[in-house]
Amino acid sequence: MNFSSVFYGYLLIGSFKTFGSKYIHDDMYLTLVGSVGCIFGSLRFFWSMLLDFNYSYPQVYGILIFLQLICSSLIFYAAQGQNKALFMVLTAFTMFCEGGHFVLVPSHCAQIFNSSKRGVQVFSYLFSCFGLSSIAGSIV
């Protein structure tokens, strides 16, 4: 599950400018998209705040996956239609969701396994999906 949801984010983050430049011929704008996206990616603490407000992990992760599904299904439409504003919003939300993985997975492992040796092992296996997603994105 993590691999699939992280894969899209890593793929877009690594290639949004290359992908966007095929349809949107404004390099300064695409640089702005990356900058705005990085700002949104730094707001990852929002996802852990939802857990603090007694939302369950499946609820919060479901919202994150739903947002990524919407972004991934509309990003090609936005770029091909040269809809700059929508392309920026979708890229920013993708980076925002991508940051959420880094705060949700550790807290979920801690909720289930506490800080036991087994919890650390499970977290290391779950965290390996980030590297695998990055490699798979490079191959694609």
Image (tube, rainbow, N blue to C red):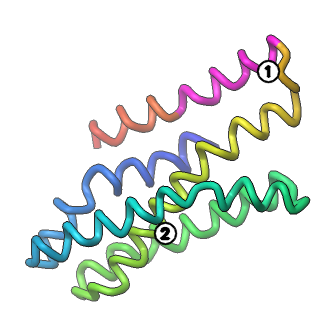
Q: Position of residue 22 (x, y in %)?
A: 12, 70
Position of 48 with respect to 83 (left or right) is: right
Residue lying furthest top: 117
| Amino acid type, callout 1 | Gly
| Amino acid type, callout 2 | Phe
Within the magenta stretch, is there residue 126?
yes
Give the quarter of the image for residue 125: top right
Residue 93, label in figure: 2
Front residue of 108/52: it is 52
Label 1 vs label 2: CA separation?
Answer: 30 Å
Classified by dominant secondary structure, the portion drawn in magenta counts as helix
Give the quarter of the image for residue 136: top left
Q: Residue at x 15, y 77 (%)?
A: 23
Front residue of 68/33: it is 33
Mark 2 and mark 1 in contact (Cβ < 8 Å)?
Answer: no
The image shows residue 124, relative to residue 126, as above or below, that is above
Q: Position of residue 1 (x, y in %)?
A: 64, 44
Q: Residue at x 8, y 78 (%)?
A: 25
Residue wearing tag 1: 119
Span colored in magenta: 117-129
Quarter of the image with the C terminus in it: top left
Q: Residue at x 64, y 29 (%)?
A: 126
The image shows residue 126, relative to residue 32, as above or below, that is above
Position of 83 with respect to 106 (left or right) is: left
